[in-house]
Image (cartoon, rainbow, N blue to C red):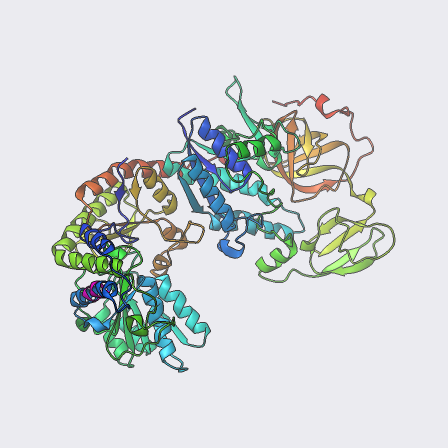
């Protein structure tokens, strides 16, 4: 069974360019980048080249790049690090309700320690109104450019401008954006930007945080001077070099790659609208899966399609697709491995049941039209079976 | 039906693990599914401490890996809360003693799980229950007691429709617990020596009253404990703290042994009396489902492990049935299931609404339950 992979928002397969760099780096005899000898120098060279590449890709200075293990660590460092640098001052932290758990849970932990958390509402389109940001008058705004579940693109520039009126530091979580949108940290007018390696085809366990020069940030871990002391511990130079290579490859493919992915998603979306007229695409008004409605869509990232299948159960649809070799996901996984109905969709006004019906399809560098065709080859039967079972009665009405 | 796809409800325990292994060996296309029933499964990491410990999920996943079958965890917490836990709380507040396991079978394992399994094209749902499903030459599918009377769990399975039974597999129905543990050991499933699961999985500390109070909007009203002579002998902190036949926690010290004989939630009254006062001559069951029948006589089981007693059944209005016992039965408990057996077959059952006082002329039904012919009025 050939696997169809359509879960890039969870993690992308390793790009060939990244694999080559990783293999070479592992074979090079690179040591600890902090060591003074030749082996350390090799690792240092890999690491600093990677830093320069990542910095160049987002319009930053190399010294503004702090490598991390990924987006979750970077988001934790942002919120807790900005709070720690505030030296006892009570910060007002504003985050949209649709943020990733690594932002929401960290912000809640800070609120328990006395900081003032403002969870901002989003509209049915998944976007936050800049006036809500201005009204919150935050000291720190943290917002995802592209939502990981829905692909909804926040109007980050407008939100940042609103936050600046109260002198806020602005953090943009670009973990899901980097593979499909061109990023320019100066244009975004932000102080901190989270990047994830494995979302764009780098090895897992890689990521970075852009920290604009002069941004007060305190480390969460101690015991090393690596990454300007903000992230102690020996850097994984080989994997970070592969991260930089993957990022460079992703960026080089833009904007054509985004258009290519958008075409795949548009095709899938139209076919699903035919297969399941009651399906609803996250970020669009109810019933807006039609081509007519798709003509004036809310800005969504090109690679994600999050679909609610009315009264069906997303989790079992994901299982059914998996049995057919199609990898997609539903909601976010809990410790046991089950899914929780999406907090993102519920924040957008979806009922709990509607949120539990959602299936997320997401695509990336190795996705092809054949993948979409393969999904569409199995989806009708799965939906038909699920629907038939949903309306079946165990007992005649009078007997129960 | 080798080759048919079957969803096996896997708890990580020995029974469902062996059930999955047996079906896999028999050529079924097994898909293992664990049901997440609590929103916070991480409360206890260790197995054997209620449902949904992370260790149980891990065990189930390891068994599925060993068998080489797909495995998923599905979140049924919302359905479990509304269909099982909320009913559990409501029943206790009504002065009844609920049986959540029956509801979990009727509404989760053999209903919601089955529906969700539809997407997978699963033809069957299987569990590690000790019970048997057989389809006779007449095409009728029947639910039978397990071969191992000591482990029989057919009581918890009443109310499954013939249609539900026809798509249900109980691979352990012909086996004893010792057989199952031996199989688990031989197949090296890693779960052979896990302890038996708790009585009610979502209240592992058995503090049912505490669970009811945590899940109630308002504190259940306090009331009086009244002895059989009409005297108020104590006060109590809510009827949900009592069950029929309960001897402890009555607030009466000394004197002859006293048992809860009746609970009236409307007046928040708990009545107590001597052991003899627990005797009932029959019961009224409501929301009765006939899996085969109706029948006029049957042996009736009023709780799990209770030895069924012969009874004459009479259909009252609608889905209510009166059962008159051959011999008095102690501690008939409203809220529990009354399950009707004809020999090994579960022909129906319902929920006990009330106990009936003993009658002098109880019955001329014959004393040996196996001698009671199940007579259908059809």
Return the residue found at the far front: A37
Between residues A370 and B330, which one lies in front from this camera angle?
A370
Return the residue found at the far right: B255
Q: Is residue A168 something one can see in this rendering?
A: yes
Magenta span = A44-49
Q: In which quarter of the image is residue B293?
A: top right
Q: In which quarter of the image is residue A123?
A: bottom left
Between residues B98 and A225, which one lies in front from this camera angle?
A225
Q: Is residue A147 left or right of residue B255?
A: left
Query: Is residue B300 positioned above or below B139 on the image?
Result: below
Quarter the N terminus of chain A occupies: top left
- The answer to if A278 sits in the magenta stretch is no
- The answer to if A48 sits in the magenta stretch is yes
Between residues A203 and A311, which one lies in front from this camera angle?
A203
Location of residue B260 in the rendering, given as x and y in whole percent from the top left corner? 76, 49
Magenta span dominant secondary structure = helix
Q: In this view, does B368 lie to the left or right of B316?
A: right
Query: Is residue B322 positioned above or below B255 on the image?
Result: above
Location of residue A110 in the rendering, given as x and y in whole percent from the top left corner? 42, 72
Location of residue A118 in the rendering, given as x and y in whole percent from the top left corner? 38, 73
Q: Which residue is drawn at 48% across and 34% down?
A: B20
Location of residue B250 in the rendering, given as x and y in whole percent from the top left corner? 77, 55
Q: In this view, does B35 lie to the left or right of B153?
A: left
Query: Is residue B194 positioned above or below B272 on the image?
Result: above
Between residues A321 and A236, which one lies in front from this camera angle?
A236
């Amino acid at each position: 069974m050939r696997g169809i992979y359509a879960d890039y928002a969870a993690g992308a397969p390793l790009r060939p360019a990244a694999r080559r760099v990783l293999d070479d780096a592992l074979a090079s005899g690179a040591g600890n980048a902090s060591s003074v000898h030749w082996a350390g120098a090799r690792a240092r060279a890999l690491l600093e080249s990677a830093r320069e590449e990542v910095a160049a890709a987002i319009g930053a200075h190399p010294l503004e790049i702090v490598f991390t293990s990924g987006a979750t660590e970077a988001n934790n460092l942002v919120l807790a690090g900005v709070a720690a640098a505030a030296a006892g001052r009570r910060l007002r932290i504003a985050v949209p309700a649709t943020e990733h758990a690594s932002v929401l849970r960290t912000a809640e932990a800070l609120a328990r320690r006395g900081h003032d958390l403002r969870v901002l509402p989003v509209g049915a389109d998944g976007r936050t109104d800049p006036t809500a940001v201005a009204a919150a008058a935050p000291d720190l705004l943290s917002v995802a450019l592209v939502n990981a579940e829905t692909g909804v693109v926040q109007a980050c520039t407008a939100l940042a401008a609103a936050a600046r009126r109260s002198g806020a530091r602005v953090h943009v979580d670009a973990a899901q954006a980097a593979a499909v949108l061109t990023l320019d940290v100066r244009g975004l007018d932000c102080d901190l930007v989270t990047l994830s390696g494995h979302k764009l085809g780098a090895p897992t366990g890689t990521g970075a945080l852009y920290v604009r020069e002069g941004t007060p940030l305190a480390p969460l871990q101690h015991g090393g001077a690596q990454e300007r002391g903000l992230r102690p511990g020996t850097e994984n130079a080989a994997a970070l070099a592969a991260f930089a290579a993957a990022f460079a490859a992703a960026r080089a493919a833009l904007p054509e790659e985004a258009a290519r992915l958008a075409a795949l998603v548009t095709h899938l979306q139209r076919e699903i609208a035919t297969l399941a007229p009651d399906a609803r695409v996250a970020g669009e008004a109810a019933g807006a899966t039609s081509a007519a409605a798709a003509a004036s869509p809310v800005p969504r990232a090109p690679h994600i399609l999050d679909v609610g299948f009315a009264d069906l159960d997303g989790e079992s649809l994901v299982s059914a697709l998996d049995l057919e070799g199609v990898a997609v996901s539903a909601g976010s996984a809990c410790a046991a491995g089950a899914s929780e109905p999406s907090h993102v969709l519920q924040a957008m006004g979806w009922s709990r049941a509607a949120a539990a019906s959602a299936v997320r399809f997401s695509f990336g560098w190795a996705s092809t039209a054949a993948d979409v065709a393969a999904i569409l080859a199995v989806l009708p039967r799965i939906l038909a079976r699920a629907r038939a079972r949903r309306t079946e009665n165990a007992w005649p009405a009078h007997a129960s | 039906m080798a080759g048919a796809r079957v969803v096996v409800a896997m708890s990580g325990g020995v029974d469902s693990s062996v059930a999955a292994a047996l079906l896999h060996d028999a050529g079924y296309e097994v898909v293992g599914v664990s049901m997440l029933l609590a929103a916070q499964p991480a409360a206890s990491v260790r197995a054997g401490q209620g449902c949904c410990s992370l260790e149980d999920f891990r065990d189930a996943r390891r068994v599925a890996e060993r068998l080489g079958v797909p495995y998923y965890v599905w979140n049924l917490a919302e359905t479990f809360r509304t269909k099982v836990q909320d009913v559990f709380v409501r029943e206790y507040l009504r002065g009844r003693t609920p049986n959540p396991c029956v509801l979990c079978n009727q509404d989760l394992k053999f209903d919601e799980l089955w529906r969700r399994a539809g997407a997978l094209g699963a033809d069957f749902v299987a569990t590690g229950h000790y019970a048997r499903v057989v389809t006779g030459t007449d095409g009728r599918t029947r639910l039978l007691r397990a071969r191992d009377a000591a482990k029989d769990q057919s009581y918890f399975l009443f109310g499954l429709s013939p249609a539900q039974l026809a798509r249900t597999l109980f691979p352990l129905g012909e086996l004893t617990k010792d057989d199952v543990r031996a199989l688990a050991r031989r197949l090296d499933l890693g779960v052979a020596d896990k302890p038996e699961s708790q009585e009610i999985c979502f209240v592992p500390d058995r503090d049912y009253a505490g669970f009811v109070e945590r899940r109630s909007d308002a504190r259940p009203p306090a009331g009086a404990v009244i002895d059989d002579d009409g005297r108020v002998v104590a006060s109590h902190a809510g009827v949900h703290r009592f069950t029929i036949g309960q001897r402890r926690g009555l607030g009466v010290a000394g004197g002859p042994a006293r048992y809860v004989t009746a609970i009236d939630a409307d007046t928040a009254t708990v009545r107590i009396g001597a052991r003899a006062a627990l005797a009932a001559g029959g019961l009224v069951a409501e929301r009765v489902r006939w899996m085969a029948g109706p029948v006029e006589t049957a042996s009736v089981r009023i709780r799990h492990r209770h030895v069924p007693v012969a009874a004459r059944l009479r259909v009252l209005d609608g889905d209510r049935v009166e059962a008159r016992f051959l011999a008095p039965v102690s501690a008939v408990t409203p809220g529990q299931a009354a399950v009707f057996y004809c020999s090994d077959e579960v022909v129906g059952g319902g929920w006990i609404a009330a106990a009936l006082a003993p009658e002098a002329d109880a019955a001329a039904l014959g004393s040996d339950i196996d001698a009671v012919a199940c007579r259908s009025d059809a």
